[in-house]
Each structure stands twice: as structure tokens, then as C-alpha cells.
Amino acid sequence: MEAVFPLDKFPELITERLILRQISNDDVAGFLKLRSNPEVMRYIPRPLSKTEQEIIDFFNVGEELYEKGEMINFAIALKQTNKFIGSIGFYRTKWHANRTEVGYILDPDHKGNGYVHEALKEMIRFAFHEIGFHSIEAIIDPRNTPSINVIERAGFVKEGHLKESDFWNGEYIDCLIYSLINKN
Ligand SMILES: CC(C)(COP(=O)(O)OP(=O)(O)OC[C@H]1O[C@@H](n2cnc3c(N)ncnc32)[C@H](O)[C@@H]1OP(=O)(O)O)[C@@H](O)C(=O)NCCC(=O)NCCS
């Protein structure tokens, strides 16, 4: 298995209603809207973004990590309009185990439509059948019911509940570990 993504160019993945495509500077405002919203970021232990420059820096780091084979982050856009509504990606990839970690974030204006479910299904196909990953992990705060629903709906299995294993915003927080193993 490669130590970088075995891809000629950044892929574009198409589903019934969505395009998963490379994030671009046109998405900065849309991404800032999510990363600056305390409700959206409630269970993501990362600082709130305040400026467009922080998002541009974040995108640049993402590109470097993509080149190094560590992460691949897609914009989720509506197929009909190409409007940015969120992102989904693979992070902290461990090539020696062909394992990666999935994460996603959705504009609350578009929640409740199954868009992340649809994007995640396609990402699983891409991971197992195009990249060749053996397993995908998801780390979720036990209070994050919408994310638990998304991951369980995609067939991920709960493998562990780590008690007070992280520290964020002045409190110790639990983490659920989910995974999906490629059985084919
Ligand atoms: C986690 C998050 C992505 C879930 O968003 P979501 O809109 O609930 O997820 P989906 O887009 O898959 O939509 C699923 C919902 O749409 C409904 N739905 C409607 N049409 C659907 C369809 N065609 N297919 C599937 N579900 C559909 C489902 O019933 C479900 O609602 P329910 O959970 O009330 O039953 C979103 O809450 C979010 O961005 N949270 C903040 C960031 C975050 O915490 N990320 C995860 C960190 S671990």
C-alpha cells in the first residue's frame, strides 16, 4: 500500500444529489460560517475560527497533508447549484494498517435531508474500492446524537467508549470509537 493517496489527481465523486469535490477558495465563506458557529462546533474539540484568513490557512495545511498522504478533505456541494454545504474527509491516515478516520460537518440549513448519509456511503465505496483502505474509524462525543445516527446508519460498529480520555473547554470528555471494516 502507498504512503500517499494512489490518485493521479484530486478526485470528484458524484452521488444522486451531491458532488464531493476539492475544496477551493470559493468555499472559504461557507466553511467559515460552519467553523465559527459554536452550535456546529459543539462536539468538535477545535477552536472556533474567526477570520477568513484562518480558513485559508486551514485549507493550505489540508493541501500539505493531502500531499503527504495523511488526509483528504472534500467539499460537499449540491449537484444542482454547486453550492458548498459542508465537508467530509479522511484524516490521520495510518497506511501501515490501511486505516483512516472519517469526519464530517454540515451547514445546519441543510440538515435532516440525508446529505451526509449519502456522502458517507460514497466515501466508504471510495475508501474500500478505489483507495484500498481496510478499515475506517470514527471518533464521536457520546452526546453528539446526530453524528452517532449518521455513523450507525452507515453500518459502523461501536468498539469502545473511552472515559474522560480527552480534555476540551475545561472538561474531561468521553469518546466513542466506531469502525467499519472492509470484509470484501
Ligand atoms: C453530524 C451531522 C453531520 C448530522 O447531520 P444530519 O443532517 O442529521 O445527517 P444527514 O445529512 O445524514 O441527514 C440524516 C437525517 O435526515 C433524515 N433524512 C431525510 N431524508 C433522508 C434520506 N434521503 N436519506 C437518509 N436520511 C434522510 C434522516 O431521517 C435523518 O434525520 P434523523 O437523524 O432525525 O432521523 C450534523 O449534525 C453536523 O454537521 N453536526 C456538527 C458537526 C459534527 O458534530 N460533526 C461530527 C463530528 S464527530
Image (cartoon, helix red, strand yellow):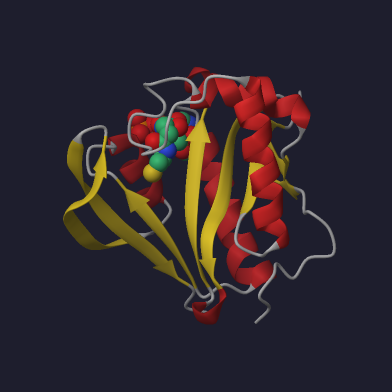
For this orientation, the residue located farthest to the right is 8
Answer above or below: position of 180 versus 55.
below
Going by the image, does 167 lie left or right of 91?
left
Q: Quadrant of residue 161?
A: bottom left
Quadrant of the image where one finds ligand 1 = top left
Q: Residue furthest left?
A: 163
User: Is residue 114 something one can see in this rendering?
Assistant: no
Q: State the residue in front, 97 or 47.
A: 47
- Residue 23 spot, x, y in % from top left: 72, 38
Q: Is residue 5 visible?
A: yes
Residue placed at 32% from the left, 45% from the top?
148
The residue nearer to you, when weighing 87 against 164, is 164
Quarter holding residue 149 = top left
Q: Quadrant of the N terminus?
A: bottom right
Instruction: Please provide percent x and percent y for residue 56.
Output: 68, 32
Left or right, 46 with reference to 29: left
Q: How many marks?
A: 0
Q: Which residue sits at x=35%, y=53%?
A: 139
Q: Residue at x 54, y 76 (%)?
A: 98
Position of 6 compared to 49: left or right?
right
Residue 125 coordinates in the image, percent (x, y) = 60, 62
Q: Position of residue 51 (x, y in %)?
A: 59, 19
Residue at horizontal 69 percent and vertical 68 percent from the top: 130
In the rendered image of this protein, does residue 118 appear above or below residue 131? above
Q: Nearer the viewer, residue 145 or 102?
A: 102
